[in-house]
Every structure is written in C-alpha cells, then in structure tokens.
Image (tube, rainbow, N blue to C red):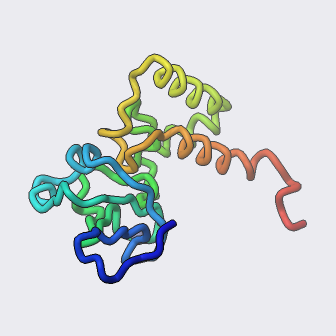
C-alpha cells in the first residue's frame, strides 16, 4: 500500500467504497457497464475511470466511480443482490432465477443447478462479464442462495431452541 499523496493531482483517486452506503465494491470491467447500462446512462460513461460494483442489498447504487454513481434504474437488468423478487436472475447466462432455485429446492433437485452451470462454465459458454451486472461468475450467488434455502428445512439444530 502506498501513502496517499494529496499533492499529486494527476493521480486518479482510487474510490473503493460506495459513496452512498460505504460498502467495499469489487472492480468491474468496462465491458460490463457497456453491456448493461441503459442507453442514457451509457451516454455519460467515462471509460477512463475505474468502476466498482456495490454489493449492498439495501443500497440503490449498482456501480460507482470517483465521479459518478449508477443506480438500479440505470441498469437494464434486475440486479440479483438488490432485487429480492423471485424473477431476479441468480444465473444470468443460463437463466436461473431466484424462484427457480426455490422451486428446485422444494422439489429436491437443487444440487443439479450448480452442476449444470459448472458444466457450462467448463465448456466455455459462460458470459458473466456481459450478462451479470456484478461482472463476475454467478456460481457463488447460486450456491449461497441454495445453502440459505436449505438451512431451515434441514436442521432443527440451527435454531436457538
Ligand atoms: Zn452502495
């Protein structure tokens, strides 16, 4: 880590936390914003800036840079982390929604979904950088969602009683 130099105006400020909620955001490739911003929002994009994804479910900001934030209304697709509806995609490339994961869990077929996604990834079909607003692989979201869905049914021991 370097010590910030307040006297170097030509160095871009590295903004790593969302200016609205303070969450740390991971860097997103420019191609993700180009693919998923609405036309009006894309028209204001500064390709020279670094952009990060805000993962906080309660925060309306999807992307932020040193000078600008992009909110959910400026992104063409529902953002899984921020949209709690069943219709929100967990896997954007192969079309598994939150409701699909819930249904598969109820029907006992949840384990097949990450396996299918994994097979597509291995076959080189995954396009998360242009389909998924987080700009990276969805498998973590899918696995976390499935684990959360399975916890209450699976255990009495997780409860406080
Ligand atoms: Zn935020």
Query: Which residue occupies 36% across, 51% down?
Result: 28
- Residue 20 vertical placement versus 42 (above, below): below
Q: Which of 20 and 109 is in front in this view?
A: 20
- Residue 137 vertical placement versus 59 (above, below): above
Q: What percent of the width, then of the height, locates residue 65?
A: 29, 66
Q: Nearer the viewer, residue 15 or 77?
A: 15
The answer to which quarter of the image holds residue 106 is: top right
Query: Which residue occupies 57% across, 31% down?
Result: 114
- Residue 116 vertical placement versus 81 (above, below): above
Q: What percent of the width, then of the height, locates residue 137?
A: 46, 39
Q: Nearer the viewer, residue 94 or 161?
A: 94
Q: In which quarter of the image is ligand 1?
A: bottom left
Query: Which residue occupies 88% across, 55% down?
Result: 157
On the rendered structure, is 125 left or right of 155? Answer: left
Number of marks in the rendered image: 0
On the rendered structure, is 96 left or right of 153? Answer: left
Q: What percent of the width, then of the height, locates residue 5?
A: 37, 78
On the rendered structure, is 29 left or right of 101? Answer: left
Q: What percent of the width, then of the height, locates residue 113?
A: 56, 29
- Residue 59 vertical placement versus 41 (above, below): below
Query: Which residue occupies 39% across, 22% down?
Result: 125
Q: Check the image and name the residue furthest to the top.
A: 123
Q: Check the image and name the residue furthest to the bottom.
A: 6
| Quarter of the image that includes the C terminus | bottom right
């Amino acid at each position: 880590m370097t010590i910030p130099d307040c006297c170097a105006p030509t160095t871009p400020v590295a903004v790593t936390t969302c200016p609205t909620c303070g969450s740390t955001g991971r860097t997103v490739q420019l191609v993700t914003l180009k693919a998923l911003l609405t036309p009006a929002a894309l028209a204001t994009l500064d390709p020279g800036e670094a952009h990060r994804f805000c993962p906080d479910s309660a925060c309306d900001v999807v992307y932020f840079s040193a000078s600008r934030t992009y909110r959910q209304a400026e992104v063409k697709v529902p953002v899984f982390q921020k949209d709690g509806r069943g219709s929100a995609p967990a896997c954007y490339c192969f079309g598994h929604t939150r409701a699909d994961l819930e249904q598969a869990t109820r029907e006992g077929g949840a384990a097949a979904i990450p396996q299918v996604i994994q097979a597509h990834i291995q076959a080189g079909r995954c396009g998360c950088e242009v389909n998924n607003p987080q700009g990276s692989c969805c498998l973590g979201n899918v696995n976390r969602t499935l684990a959360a869905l399975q916890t209450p049914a699976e255990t009495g021991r997780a409860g406080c009683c």
